[in-house]
Image (cartoon, grey):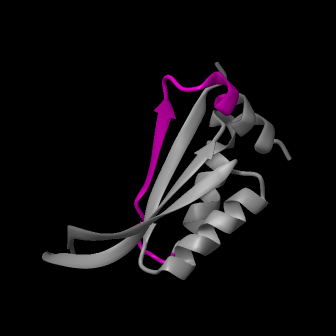
């Protein structure tokens, strides 16, 4: 099976999430991106506990495209310190993994 990676982030507005998703897929840095519904996040920020509503975005990509995708997310992200997490998928449908690789070729 070709390996795939999932890159996730959260942002403060649906329009921002949609923009990140469209840019990544349009630039072939991700085969697909899924924007998830609102989630309430609680975290430490500047010596205080904060709670905010955010939108999650999951990008499916090939491992060799992860660095460029992370760079693009960071450049477009509105947060001072964005959450950008990368997970390598150990097992999955081989046909889906092949599709991800095919779609992330420039």
* Residue 57 in magenta stretch: no
- Most extreme residue toward the right is 106
Res. 46 visible in picture: no
* Image quadrant containing the N terminus: top right
Residue 8: x %, y % from top left: 47, 53
Indicate the quadrant where residue 63 lies.
top right
Residue 24 found in image quarter: bottom right
Residue 65: image location, x then y, percent: 68, 43
Count how many numbered circles sit on residues in the image: 0
Name the residue furthest top. Answer: 1
What residue lies at 14% left-to-right and 75% top-to-bottom? 47
Q: Which residues are magenta?
A: 78-97
Residue drawn at (44%, 75%) of the image: 79
**Which residue appears at 20% of the width and 68% of the height?**
43
Q: Is residue 42 visible?
A: yes
- Residue 30 left/right relative to 26: left
Which is nearer the eye, 106 or 48? 106
Q: Is residue 60 above or below residue 24?
A: above
Q: Residue at x 25, y 69 (%)?
A: 41
Compared to residue 33, the image places residue 54 above or below, namely below
In this rendering, the answer to whether 106 lies above or below 20 is above
Instruction: Residue 105: name its quadrant.
Output: top right
The foreground one among 84 and 6 is 6
Magenta stretch holds residue 89: yes
Q: Is 22 on the left-hand or right-hand side of 37? A: right
Q: Position of residue 78 (x, y in %)?
A: 49, 78
At which x and y percent is residue 61?
64, 43
Position of 44 compared to 62: left or right? Answer: left
């Amino acid at each position: 099976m070709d390996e795939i990676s999932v890159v996730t982030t959260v942002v403060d507005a649906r329009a921002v999430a949609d923009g990140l998703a469209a840019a990544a897929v349009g630039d072939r840095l991700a085969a697909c991106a899924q924007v998830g519904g609102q989630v309430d996040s609680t975290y430490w920020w500047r010596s205080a506990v904060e709670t905010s509503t955010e939108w999650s975005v999951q990008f499916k990509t090939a491992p060799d495209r992860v660095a460029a995708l992370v760079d693009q997310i960071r450049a477009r992200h509105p947060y001072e310190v964005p959450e950008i997490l990368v997970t390598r998928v150990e097992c999955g449908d081989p046909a889906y993994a092949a599709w991800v690789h095919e779609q992330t070729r420039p």
